[in-house]
Image: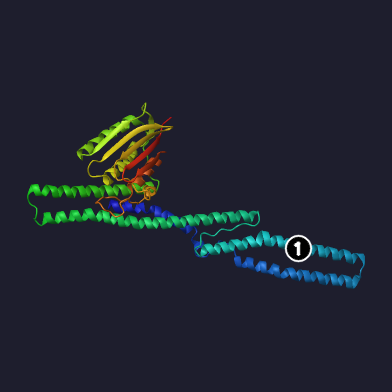
Amino acid sequence: MRSNHDFRKFYHRLHQEKLHHEKYRHLKHGEFPDWNYEEFRSMRRSMKFFRPIGFLLTLFLLFLLYYWMGLKAIGVIFALILITKEMVHFIFYQRLEKKVFKPIEQLKNGFTEIGQGNYNVSIQPEVQNEFAQLIHSFNEMALKLQESERINQEYEENRKNLVANISHDLKTPITSIQGYLEMIMEGYVTQPEQLNPYLKTIYSNTVYMNKLIDDLFLFSKLDMDKLNMNYEILNIQAYLEDLAIELKFEFEEKQLEFSYRDQTDQDYPVRIDGKRVYQAIRNIVDNAVKYGPEQDLKVVMELSKQEEYVCINIADNGPGIPADRLPHIFDRFYRIDLERSKDFVSTGLGLAIAKELIEAQGGKITVVSISGEGSRFTIKLPVQK
């Protein structure tokens, strides 16, 4: 029951993106903002029609003046006034066409492109006025729509990958548990010495499924920015020494090698959530174990100081990460072992969670790797002043 609730929270972010998309939905379906464009076009046509009518009327008035008054001075004055008026009107209409009508026509065409799904549209303003500012705002909106569409497609692809990965990673232990339970229930296993390995396998699979759900729950909180951090001032030397003792003990049980080196000259205080930093380090170390050699694996953790940061370096002698995959290892849902060549249980969230946990505390995380030689992750945490 809890997993369903957690998954619903996970998809809350997708819902937020859909709401953002709904904000501009009317543009995508060709429904333009609240203006009566047909009325605008009618007014523009009317002005174009009445402009020559006004000019002809002026000529008619001039004809009457000359007919009634001949070439008297007053007739000439009236003629000059009317000619000046027409010139002013002509200049005014030309400026109105350039500064008002044409920008509105450009915006209308831009909205039409967006309504047809073309978010790459961009309008170049020809004048610098309020309409130019409106055009700049339109271009910004088009860029946001383009980015929103990209994010929506990315999340949809990630959602599909997540469902596929979770389906695979949950089905494997569930099938194993079901098979062992059926053998026990059908009486194939009766002796305690035979039963214990079955029960241990069932237990380890249930532990894994619980861990998988916890990781997804943590990821959903990070994704919605709802993870509460319990900050405290810790001395980094003492903190890492305790963690190193724990890791060394676990590695020795697996007959693997772990070592810790402290290169700092004093115990620097850091303001961190110790539990979340521990999770980030464990995700990196667990990845080294999962992807490293089954024998002779060596992991070295080192503490050092660099400018305003304390640095936690975690290096291994594993197979390394191919150069073409290295830029993506912190992406959500990304799996280095794309072919699942080993029976690893991973949803591609471990390093993404580690990165977000560290960055949420003002830190940084980087990696360098050489294929065939190993990888080195560096966690930087700001020193408390």
Q: Which residue is found at the position 39% from the left and 37% from the top?
A: 380
User: Tag 1: residue type?
Assistant: His
Q: Nearer the viewer, residue 356 or 36?
A: 356
Element assignment for label 1: helix
On screen, 231 above or below 117? Answer: above
Looking at the picture, how far across and down is residue 108, in whole percent? Answer: 58, 63
Q: Is residue 103 visible?
A: yes
Q: Which residue is found at the position 68% from the left and 60% from the top?
A: 98
Few, some or many residues within 10 Å of mark 1 (<14, 14–19, 20+)? some
Q: Which residue is found at the position 67% from the left and 69% from the top?
A: 45
Q: Which residue is found at the position 33% from the left and 34% from the top?
A: 302
Point out the residue furthest to the left here.
Answer: 191
**Quarter of the C terminus within the rendering:** top left
Q: Count up the numbered dots.
A: 1
Q: Nearer the viewer, residue 256 or 142?
A: 256
Would you say 104 lies left or right of 320 here? right
Res 100 quadrant in image: bottom right
Would you say 177 lies left or right of 92 here? left
Looking at the picture, how far across and down is residue 161, in whole percent? Answer: 34, 56
On screen, 114 above or below 215? Answer: below
Looking at the picture, how far across and down is residue 259, in whole percent? Answer: 27, 34
Find disc 1 in the rendering and name its residue.
Answer: 89
Q: Nearer the viewer, residue 78 or 274?
A: 274
